[in-house]
Amino acid sequence: MLRVEIEKCIGCGECESACTFGAIVVEDGKAVVDADTCTMCGTCVDACPEDALELDRESGAGPGIDLDEWRGVWVTAEYRFGSTAPVTFELLGKGRQLADDLGVALTAVLMGSGVSEHASELIHRGADRVLLVDHPELENFRDEIFARILARLAREEKPEVILAGATAMGRSYIPQVATMLETGLTADCTELAVRMEDRALLQTRPAFGGNLLATIVCPAHRPQMSTVRPHVLKALEADTSRQGEIVRVPLSDDDLKARVKVLESVMEESDGPGLADAEIVIAAGRGMESEKNMEMVHELASLLDAGVGASRAVTDAEWLPHRAQIGQTGVTISPKLYLGCGISGAIQHVVGIQGSDMIVAINKDPDAPIFDLATYGIVGDVKEILPLLIKRIRQERGA
Amino acid sequence: MKIAVCIKQVPDASTVRFDKEKGTLVREGVESVINPFDYNAIEAGLSLRDQFGGEVSVVTMGPPQASEAVKEAISLGVDGGVVVSDRAFAGADTLATTYTLAKAIEKLGQFDLVICGKQAIDGDTAQVGPGLAVRLNIPCVTCVDELEAIDDGKRLRLKRMCEQGYDMVEVELPALVTVLASLNTPRVPSLKGKMRARKTEVPIMNAEDIGADVSRVGLAGSPTQVASTTIPTFDARREMLEGEPEQQVDALVDRLKEAGIL
């Protein structure tokens, strides 16, 4: 509960301007809190020059754990369908930086069957040490087993930070690990940093539909856990001269008990380049107006060997499958060129394209927010511009 | 089959606006709706009940007004539901939420299956379902795209999606699943259902009713805290390409060639 100490409050209104939720207003010279809209983020507490605001966290003083016992940064490696997921290397790049800032070792946890040969690559990409859990029973991903093993290792070794990819797999078993450890977990982080004074991991993620960026901390519990979206962080180049330690983790029968059985695991052939990995992405928005007009987008995409993505409006209308949705609730992309066709640029979508090297936007509305972040903007009708663009590119190719 | 479906009332995304000058979310006029994925969770529960009998209950944590969401679920055909509501629950992160929901579900009895939507569209964390499974000590299968009960409803055969493809898995009940929008097409409310919803008084359970330790709910039971919030800003290096469409396209093609893209 956010409390106002009425005697201290001078009614300056600093809290009112600091609050992003409109949950605190000055009435009759004193701050008044709307308990229903207050999210207890504490921004107003920091803003108050009179120390008149207090967040009541008394009973939340923490589980009485000794934070100093917890040291080290861990990255969980994701290995599926015969290869290590690229997000693993991205996490190791950031993990290396965090570990250096904290003055601790970076450990990668690799679980799977027949994965031993992939351990050294994790060292080449930044890890000091690999906890290698290689067992035939880990051939397929089963939440229970993966979660139980990671939670056990974390209890034994006490890392202060655990990072995982915000993939289907990470988003499934990592929340179970956090619950088993009774600690905090921040989903889909886009930025991570260390606050040195208390070694807190500052975890930034889009919140409230991407309208805000919230920085989350986990002050009194360990480990501090985050999932991070693929394609947000930069991986380090592989350095084959890097040396590190590979520790094999033995498993007991108790580690391997499971109530879920995997019958088969199927890798699907994708049509064209995967959206998340494409160097060029053509994205369609509501401004395409009809499913028929989508043909222009597909034609341009095949001409440029581009991936095709969309805003939520387009996938909701089923002009494209849901997996084509780019943004907060969809895919994050970081192509060389993003070409938005009839996309207005709702924050929901924009948070998924910020990593693009070049953003080109075509939209009828000169006030569309997408133009605020476009490298090049064209105010015009996509139905007119796209055919001309296709024609010009064909000419270029023919020449 | 006894089924619990966890639902959440969320702000209707299409009515949320952002006041850029003030830097605040405009809450007035924002309607509350059932989280879109939760309709698929409700539908999954109802079709299993249609097939095997039993009952479907919805559970939601939120302010007392969340009873509207329960009523809507009843209009769709669920048998009943509760709102888990207490001032002490405010400010809960996903860890405190899973504790609270687990306490409420345990209070309501033994369930064969707990169904959640893939994620709520306001927080987008997808963490409550898997965490709740741990609390209830039942197995969890997320991102379910196909669901079939086998062995007379003692087990489920599920298609679980991932980035590269999918897994076909079997799980013994009791279990928890989180479902995708592609799983099914939710039914619409029936007239009879609407009448029943209107007459229903939705029970509200508070911290004491569910036997919750108040130090483990709400802000007090939440390890994570918001340290600060900022409004995202973007580096605009914008150049508007002016002129007739032909000139605009020529200018764009020139820029793409310069950048080595064409």
Image (tube, coloured by chain):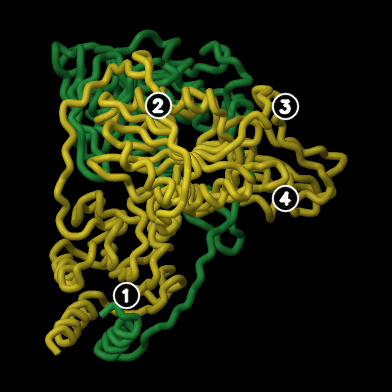
Helix, strand or loop for disc 3: helix
Q: Are marks 2 and 3 on the same chain?
A: yes
Helix, strand or loop for disc 1: strand
- Indicate which disc, 2 or 3, sits on the residue closer to the N terminus: 3
Q: Chain of mark 3?
A: A
The residue identified by callout 3 is A58
User: Which residue shows up at 25% across the image and 50% down it?
Assistant: A323
Helix, strand or loop for disc 4: helix
The residue identified by callout 2 is A147
- Chain B on-screen colour: green
Of discs 2 and 3, which sits in the foreground? Answer: 2
- Indicate which disc, 4 or 3, sits on the residue closer to the N terminus: 4
Looking at numbered disc 1 in the image, what kind of residue is underneath it? Ile
Residue A7 falls in which quadrant of the image? Answer: top right
Of discs 1 and 2, which sits in the foreground? Answer: 2
- Indicate which disc, 4 or 1, sits on the residue closer to the N terminus: 4
- Chain A on-screen colour: yellow
| Residue A252 coordinates in the image, percent (x, y) | 37, 16
Q: Give neighbour class at mark 4: few <14, some 14-19, many 20+ (Cα, 10 Å).
A: many
Q: Chain of mark 2?
A: A
**Which quarter of the figure is the C terminus of chain A placed in?**
bottom left
Label disc, if present, on residue A15 of the rendered structure: 4
